[in-house]
Amino acid sequence: MAITSTRPAARRSGLFSFPNPVDERAARTVALGVVVMALAVLVLRQWWVLIPLAYGFVARVASGPRFSPLGLLATRVVVPRLPFAPKYCAGPPKRFAQAIGAVCSLTALVLHLAVGADTAALTVLGVLTVAASLEAFVGFCLGCWMFGRLMRWGLIPDDVCEECNDISRRLAA
């Protein structure tokens, strides 16, 4: 699960930067939007929804919510109106999770459009829906959990996420 703290750390700025920290309320709101969009494809077979779904993931990986309609809706409209206090978590694991979503949604899009393998596309989208549902409804980020495991195994360098590595911050949170 993502590392949480009560106050934000430094943010990186720039066109293609990802926010750090991330307000978990926004991440869960985006995940809920992903679930709704994915269900539109899974249940209603609205295949066109794969295009904005995939675009949104790619946009969020590239620059956080800045160019993502769903990210902007979450951060500028929904979250400011929620009655809950902000809950911050490390940005790099969330970006990793968005990258996994990008791979899944792009894979489903290619499977449907280029290959015509609709069953395979729906299967990939089903996996994405389960992961997004865990984030939206339970607050468990599967991508963040995987990020932590990869750091422990040494596949992601420690300096990628100092907050993830600092046990004192975890205990304080």
Image (tube, rainbow, N blue to C red):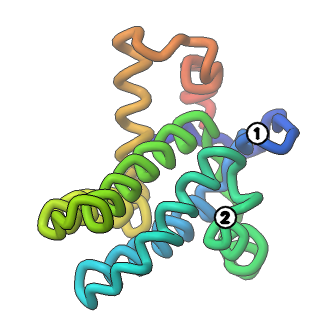
Mark 2 or mark 1: name the one nearer the start of the chain.
Answer: 1
- Residue 143: where, in percent of width, then height? 40, 42
Question: Residue 15's image quarter?
Answer: top right
Left or right: 135, with 55 as reference point:
left
Residue 111 left/right relative to 133: left
Element assignment for label 1: loop
Disc 2: which residue: 68
Which picture quadrant has residue 154? top left
Check residue 17 in the rendering and tell me which mark sits there, or answer none. Answer: 1
Placement of 123 over or under 21, stated as above or below: below
Tell me the distance, in whole angstroms, between the alpha carbons under discs 2 and 1. Answer: 13 Å
User: Where, quadrant-wise, is the C terminus in this rendering?
Assistant: top right
Q: Nearer the viewer, residue 29 or 106?
A: 106
SS assignment at label 2? loop
Left or right of 6 in this view: 37: left
Within the image, what quadrant is residue 18 found in? top right
Q: Where does residue 92 sit, x and y in percent of width and height?
A: 59, 34
Say if residue 128 shows up in the picture. yes
Q: Residue at x 38, y 62 (%)?
A: 132
